[in-house]
Amino acid sequence: MTSSSSHSGRAILALAAAALLLGCGASSKTARPPVKGLAQRQVQFEQVVYPFYVFVPSSFDGSHPAPAILLIHGFGGRGTDMIGLWQNFAEQNGIILVGPTLPLGGNFETAVALQLYPIIMDSV
């Protein structure tokens, strides 16, 4: 292999790797279509803002209380992932879904989460 073909081969590999990396990043940031009844909210607790999503079934008109379920994701999950799993059930049964996207690790699960969950539900 000559020096110029070696350089062009490396350039092609570099371009292919860059395209692959850009493609991977784009797919994870692609906007999801809006889901009817889904709204993003947030609460502040101990100077930290915690985002969460609320799904309200189309049958809910606010004239009477409705049951609500707090959905907790596992490691690396998001509130919207959990809502997506339960959305059809909630729509059919008139249940409000609350899906926070929360950090894991450290003292969050033991010191913060147990105080934060009621604050989130009260805000809904």
Image (cartoon, helix red, strand yellow):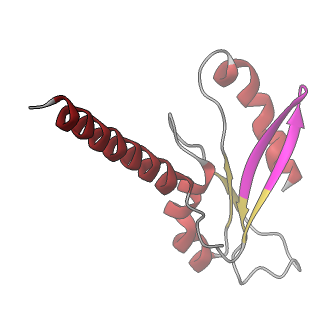
Q: Nearer the viewer, residue 81 or 90?
A: 81
Which stretch did the figure color magenta?
A: 41-53
Residue 33 is situated, as x and y percent measured from the top left of the image, at 60, 72
Pick the quarter of the image with the C terminus.
bottom right
Question: What is the quadrant of residue 108 in the picture?
Answer: top right
Q: Is residue 28 above or below residue 74?
A: below
Q: Nearer the viewer, residue 43 or 26?
A: 26
What residue do we see at 60% from left, 56% from top? 80
Looking at this view, name the residue that lies furthest to the top: 106
Residue 54 is situated, as x and y percent measured from the top left of the image, at 73, 60
Q: Is residue 47 left or right of residue 15?
A: right
Residue 43 is situated, as x and y percent measured from the top left of the image, at 86, 43
**Is residue 21 found inside the magenta-colored segment of the image?**
no
**Is residue 51 found inside the magenta-colored segment of the image?**
yes
What residue do we see at 80% from left, 49% from top? 121
Count of numbered labels shown in the rendering: 0
Q: Is residue 85 left or right of residue 6?
A: right
What residue do we see at 64% from left, 73% from top? 35
What residue do we see at 73% from left, 50% from top? 52
